[in-house]
């Protein structure tokens, strides 16, 4: 089971869309969890319409990537650092236990140059919840309902800003069209969405036309996707080329200390060194 945990509608499509599509196609089940309601980023001056259009688009991109469901935590956009970190952590612990989440993709909690408080608040709450969910004395009321402690076994912190650490690249070459579809779903905000259609209109006003924009059709959606292929895949292509791949996504991969590994070390040592007890039980 995996969860990709984002703050805003356009985070997953730009930071881990290919890897999510790949893991889900290989057999994972996944949930998209979003911490804020995106009420600051949208095409109209109406807060309500902004929240609604983003929410609908997240449903579209979640379906495109193959998620089983979307869970919206609904905190106010840009103000997550004013919310209770303990409440956010508690809600994430509950979800990790209830959904038995093994693998998480999210923001690097200590990532350099991160100026958006929604990003680092989300990363830090996830980081703490990922191990705390496995403890048997944290939030005992959850356990009293029959839920079991459950530890997240691996974390992929995506690279949201230049200079943030990366120790793993994932080959997403086979999932580029899914990435494009997910990016294109963000019509309300972000650099993708309806940028192709807007560029076509801008050029037309100047009496110009870019034939490549209409390479796969003249419909709005086809033009938007072509814009993404032309202008928004470059960093994934460049990273891939450095590693002999067509397209790749960068992560800081973290595998928290694994108690099952210690247990297997103990078993291996016992198999070699343990001796039978003497008759008197003293050895
Ligand atoms: Zn964001």
Image: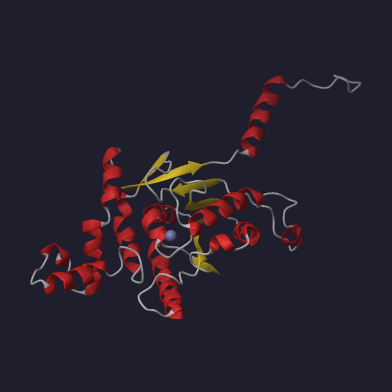
Q: Is residue 211 left or right of residue 49?
A: left
Image coordinates for residue 179, horizontal then vertical, percent? 33, 58
- In the image shown, does 34 or 17 lie closer to the viewer? 34
Q: Residue at x 75, y 51 (%)?
A: 137
- In the image shown, does 17 or 159 lie closer to the viewer? 159
Image coordinates for residue 262, horizontal then vertical, percent? 65, 33
Q: Residue at x 64, y 62 (%)?
A: 87
Q: Quadrant of the C terminus?
A: top right
The answer to whether residue 200 shows anywhere in this view is yes
The answer to whether residue 29 shows anywhere in this view is no
Quarter, ligand 1: bottom left
Q: Which residue reaches farthest left?
A: 207
Vertical arrangement, residue 117 with respect to residue 63, above or below: above
Quarter-of-image position of residue 99 = bottom right
Q: Is residue 123 left or right of residue 10?
A: right
Q: Is residue 111 left or right of residue 200?
A: right
Quarter-of-image position of residue 66 = bottom left
Vertical arrangement, residue 29 with respect to residue 272, above or below: below
Q: Residue at x 10, y 68 (%)?
A: 209
Number of on-image labels: 0
Q: Is residue 195 left or right of residue 250?
A: left
Q: Which residue reaches farthest right?
A: 280
- In the image shown, does 222 or 201 lie closer to the viewer? 201
Image coordinates for residue 155, horizontal then vertical, percent? 51, 47
Image coordinates for residue 138, horizontal then vertical, percent? 72, 53
Q: What colouring style does the render use?
A: secondary structure
């Amino acid at each position: 089971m995996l969860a990709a945990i984002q703050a805003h509608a356009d985070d997953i499509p730009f930071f881990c869309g290919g890897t999510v599509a790949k893991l889900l196609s290989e057999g994972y089940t996944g949930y998209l969890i979003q911490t804020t309601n995106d009420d600051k980023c949208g095409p109209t001056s109406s807060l309500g319409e902004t929240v609604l259009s983003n929410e609908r688009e997240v449903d579209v991109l979640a379906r495109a990537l193959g998620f089983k469901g979307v869970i919206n935590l609904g905190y106010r956009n840009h103000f997550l650092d004013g919310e209770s970190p303990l409440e956010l952590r508690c809600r994430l612990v509950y979800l990790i236990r209830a959904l038995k989440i093994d693998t998480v993709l999210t923001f690097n909690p200590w990532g350099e140059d991160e100026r958006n408080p929604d990003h680092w608040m989300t990363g830090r709450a996830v980081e703490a919840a990922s191990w705390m969910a496995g403890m048997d004395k944290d939030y005992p009321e959850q356990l009293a309902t029959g839920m079991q402690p459950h530890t997240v076994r691996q974390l992929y912190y995506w690279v949201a800003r230049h200079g943030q650490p990366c120790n793993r690249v994932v080959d997403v070459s086979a999932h580029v069209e899914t990435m494009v579809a997910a990016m294109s779903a963000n019509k309300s905000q972000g650099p993708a969405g309806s940028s192709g259609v807007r560029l076509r209109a801008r050029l037309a006003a100047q009496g110009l036309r870019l034939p490549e924009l209409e390479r796969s059709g003249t419909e709005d959606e086809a033009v938007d996707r072509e814009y993404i292929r032309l202008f928004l895949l470059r960093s994934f292509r460049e990273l891939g080329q450095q590693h002999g791949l067509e397209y790749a996504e960068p992560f800081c991969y973290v595998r928290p200390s694994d108690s099952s590994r210690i247990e297997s070390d103990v078993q291996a040592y016992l198999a070699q060194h343990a001796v039978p007890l003497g008759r008197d039980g003293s050895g």
